[in-house]
Amino acid sequence: MKAAIFVKPGQMEARELPQPVVEFPTDAVIKIVRACVCGSDLWWYRGLSKRPANEPVGHEAIGVVESVGAAVTAVKPGDFVIVPFTHGCGHCAACLAGFEGNCLTFHHQGSPVGYQAEYLRYENADWSLVKVPGQPEDYTDAQLNDLLALSDVMATATTPPFRLRCTLVTPWSLWVMVRSACPGFFPLSCWGQSALLR
């Protein structure tokens, strides 16, 4: 399969890598439909932060489940899913409180993972993947792009300190949040979460 690889600041390559397989019972292999570049990817691309050379890249995607490990019951092959950058276990205090981006037990294991590829091995699939009704062909390009944005921006907006701010939001003060790390989606996320908290 083809995958995007970071070579050095300012240089990326598309390389052939082995297609991922289920390595652990909590894994799922996803056929990527769309992936994108996050602003945080530009830090190491520009040389502003360190990243090991020759590593697969990307942390946001949507796709279709190809295969699952024995412990995965929430999704099955053929399901269309949002693939967030978070990999919460679903059992620790942080995950149960809704902060899976701060999972107390998750530690990457197995082969390197990069979402900007034709396939991805996703860890803790039972908890973190978000099933989308239907199949990718049921959606317009614009709708697929909106779903893709949810894989990163909504997960960012629901991790501390952003979630803490959400509890203080009122509908008439949402404009203040536009200056957050996730302009556009963060205010919407906060509105939805603050409505749930009332």
Image (cartoon, rainbow, N blue to C red):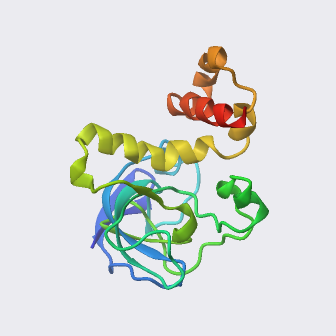
Residue 41 visible in the current orientation: no
**Residue 154: which quarter of the image?**
top right
Front position in the image: 40 or 141: 141
Front position in the image: 79 or 67: 79
Measured from the top left, where is residue 168 in percent x and y?
75, 27
Residue at image x 41%, y 62%? 7
**Residue 50: which quarter of the image?**
bottom right
Residue at image x 30%, y 66%? 118
Query: Is 149 displayed left or right of 159 in the figure?
Result: left
Residue 90 visible in the current orientation: yes
Q: How many marks?
A: 0
Measured from the top left, where is residue 41 in percent x and y?
48, 49
Q: Quadrant of the N terminus?
A: bottom left
Measured from the top left, where is residue 32 in percent x and y?
32, 62
Residue at image x 71%, y 68%? 91
Q: Residue furthest top?
A: 172
154, above or below 135, in the image: above
Front position in the image: 49 or 41: 41
Query: Is 164 displayed left or right of 159 in the figure?
Result: right
Q: Quadrant of the C terminus?
A: top right
Measured from the top left, where is residue 116 in percent x and y?
37, 59
Residue at image x 25%, y 45%? 139
Q: Residue furthest right?
A: 93
